[in-house]
């Protein structure tokens, strides 16, 4: 089995829908036992993700937790350890957008995006590293964005959070490499999700005109990269940013 994850335990934050759901399903298909994290209001979607995993013969639990809050993050780890006994893989996928031109961007729009996209990754990674260091094996996979590489007008908060995630990941990679733990970023381009449903047709066409493949990705085209980076096959890859963008950022 390619990217064999049998015997591994993975946590996917924001795993109820979109890219997070696709990653959770992909990890489970490759044998991982999965904790699907979701925020209040997304319970039905999280249970649907779990049902799909279980119907395919996989094992999973769902845990409601606001990953911006340290106490919720600790509960997420505790419930995973209680159910599965360990944590091998953490996928920091939870993320939001609050788009606006910088001159009109509110403090709240800035802070909310930073808290969800960057602070949450810090809190979850810090908590997950404790059991990973003890077992001397782990995989941190952070879901970034090409916006964190090239920027995007109207997304100063989002681009800054994703750029920060790249720097954070590289620092973590250097800190824990000696313990058998890797940390990497996958940076999708334009992906068909509920987040991108809010774009106008003009915005969509502008992005497509810059994408050599001329189309958006599906979440299912992003997920295998996360599974690969979570596997033993990627044991010599760390601190890397893997763009999955249809050629949008090629140089």
Image (spheres, rainbow, N blue to C red):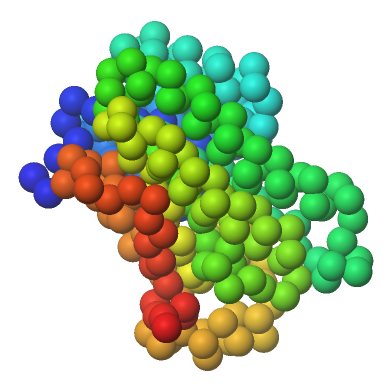
Query: Splitting the image into 4 quarters, where does residue 201 fall?
Result: bottom right
How many labels were placed on the picture? 0
Q: What x and y, as percent, mark residue 56?
A: 22, 37
Q: In percent of the image, x 27 and y 50: which residue is there?
A: 237
Q: Which residue appears farthest toward the left when viewing the image?
A: 1
- Asked if residue 243 shows in the view, the reply is yes
Q: In percent of the image, x 67 and y 86: which residue is there?
A: 202
Q: Quadrant of the N terminus?
A: top left
Q: What x and y, as percent, mark residue 70?
A: 65, 22
Query: Splitting the image into 4 quarters, where does residue 183 fall?
Result: top left
| Residue 211 vertical position relative to residue 60 in the rendered view, above or below | below
| Residue 115 vertical position relative to residue 75 in the rendered view, above or below | below
Q: In this orientation, which residue lies closer to the viewer: 247 or 135?
A: 135
Query: Splitting the image into 4 quarters, where does residue 168 fall?
Result: top right
Q: Which residue appears farthest toward the top when viewing the image?
A: 82
**191 left or right of 96?**
left
Q: In percent of the image, x 41 and y 66: which residue is there?
A: 243
């Amino acid at each position: 089995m390619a990217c064999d994850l049998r015997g591994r335990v993975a946590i996917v934050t924001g795993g109820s829908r979109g890219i997070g759901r696709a990653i959770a399903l992909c990890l489970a298909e490759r044998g991982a036992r999965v904790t699907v994290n979701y925020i209040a209001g997304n319970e039905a979607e999280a249970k649907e993700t779990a049902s799909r995993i279980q119907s395919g013969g996989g094992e999973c639990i769902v845990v409601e937790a606001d990953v911006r809050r340290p106490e919720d993050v600790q509960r997420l780890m505790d419930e995973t350890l209680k159910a599965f006994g360990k944590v091998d893989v953490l996928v920091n996928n939870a993320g939001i957008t609050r788009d606006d031109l910088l001159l009109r961007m509110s403090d709240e729009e800035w802070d909310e995006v930073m808290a969800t996209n960057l602070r949450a990754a810090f809190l979850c990674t810090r908590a997950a590293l404790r059991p990973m260091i003890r077992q001397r094996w782990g995989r941190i996979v952070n879901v970034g964005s090409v916006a964190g590489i090239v920027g995007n007008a109207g997304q100063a908060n989002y681009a800054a959070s994703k750029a920060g995630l790249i720097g954070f990941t590289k620092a973590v990679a250097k800190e824990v490499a000696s313990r058998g733990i890797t940390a990497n970023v996958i940076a999708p381009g334009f992906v068909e999700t509920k987040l991108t449903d809010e774009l106008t047709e003009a915005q969509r066409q502008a992005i497509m005109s810059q994408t050599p493949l001329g189309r958006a990705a599906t979440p299912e085209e992003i997920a295998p990269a996360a599974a690969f980076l979570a596997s033993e096959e990627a044991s010599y890859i760390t601190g890397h940013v893997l763009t999955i963008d249809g050629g949008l950022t090629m140089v």
